Amino acid sequence: MTLYIGREASKLWKRICAEITTEINLLLDNWKYLLAGLIFQYIHGLAARGVHYLHQPGPTLQDLGFVLLPELGQDKAYISETVFTFIFLSFVLWTFHPFIFKSKKIYTVLVWCRVLAFLVASQILRIITFYSTQLPGPNYHCREGSKLARLPKPKSVLEVLLINFPRGVIYGCGDLIFSSHMIFTLVFVLTYQKYGTRRCIKQFAWLVAIIQSFLIVASRKHYTVDVVVAWYTVNLVVFFIDKKLPELPDRSNGSLPLLLPLSTKDKDSKTKEENHKLLNGNSIDPADWRPRTQVNGKTLEDANGIHVDTAMNGA
């Protein structure tokens, strides 16, 4: 038993080391995209903080979801956040499963490049939308009479740039249309829908996304329109961007090294090698090295071709 555990642990360690090497190579080629996506997450938070300064509390707007769904109350507002945390952590863990499991379909770095592209595009639309029209927030801390409903004018630029994280993010107001929680939820679910392998998990993920939508409205964190707009906007954004981006290599067939994209250095060296062969009169394609023979004015590839052509001419 001890020998078996030791052997399996050794295999797991080798698998982790091999995966780390592969992902580091991909990270060296794609770090700019990841960094840009992460920086934009801060910009998105900064924009949400900025609109809070413009927020004007007022009576809660008439909303069909508020009529149909019972209000959870302040003491149960944590439920929707708990569900969102579960979705977020589950997706993050799934993206790192290639380091552990032998059966894998994705590269962690490449998947996160794609996910961040979806998030950034959706968040740009969100920023444009909630700065276009500021609605009175339905959340408890955004209503009239709450001290957090309005922010005093900032005393310095640094106060704005620091965005009072994480309190400023949790107790924000004014960034309503459309729901940021639903952006992350739908991007994660759609990504797993395409690259995940377990059908039951895909179905469960969609169910959780629907439940999350109802919980957000029931918690009065967003109007129903914020959730509805998120559903069709994020789906359209992911659909169109996914069509524009190159398809990710599929690792499920086992030919991992051949599917890795070439780095810029590899591409340059390959191009130089091909040019060198051409300058020296050598062909790049090994198929061009096959002997050719002319029979009846036709160039044939090999002796078998000569025999067939001769037979056809009645020889």
Image: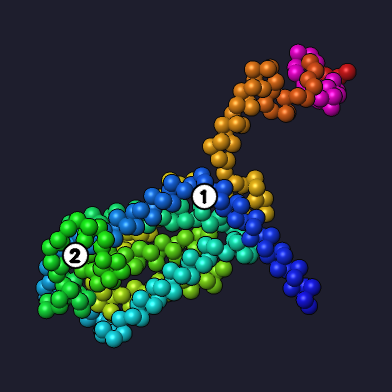
For the residues labelled 1 and 2, the Cα–Cα distance comes to: 36 Å
* Residue 275 sits inside the magenta stretch: no
Q: Earlier in the sequence, mark 1 or mark 2?
A: 1
* Residue 300 sits inside the magenta stretch: yes
Image coords of residue 217 (percent x, y): 28, 76
Residue marked by disc 2: 52
Residue 129 visible, this orientation: no
The span shown in magenta is 295-312
Give the number of the disc on residue 27: 1
The vertical placement of 126 against 31, above or below, is below
- 47 or 309, which is in the foreground? 47
Residue lying at the far right of the rendered structure: 315
Q: Residue at x 72, y 24 (%)?
A: 288
Image coords of residue 280 (percent x, y): 68, 17
Q: Residue at x 73, y 68 (%)?
A: 8
The vertical placement of 296 against 60, above or below, is above
Image coords of residue 265 (percent x, y): 56, 36
The vertical placement of 105 against 276, above or below, is below
In-image side of 147 versus 101 (left or right): left
The picture quadrant where one finds residue 213 is bottom left
Q: Residue at x 50, y 59 (%)?
A: 194
Quarter of the rendering occupied by the C terminus = top right
Q: Amino acid at mark 2?
A: His
Q: Residue at x 21, y 61 (%)?
A: 159
The picture quadrant where one finds residue 152 is bottom left
Q: Amino acid at mark 1?
A: Leu
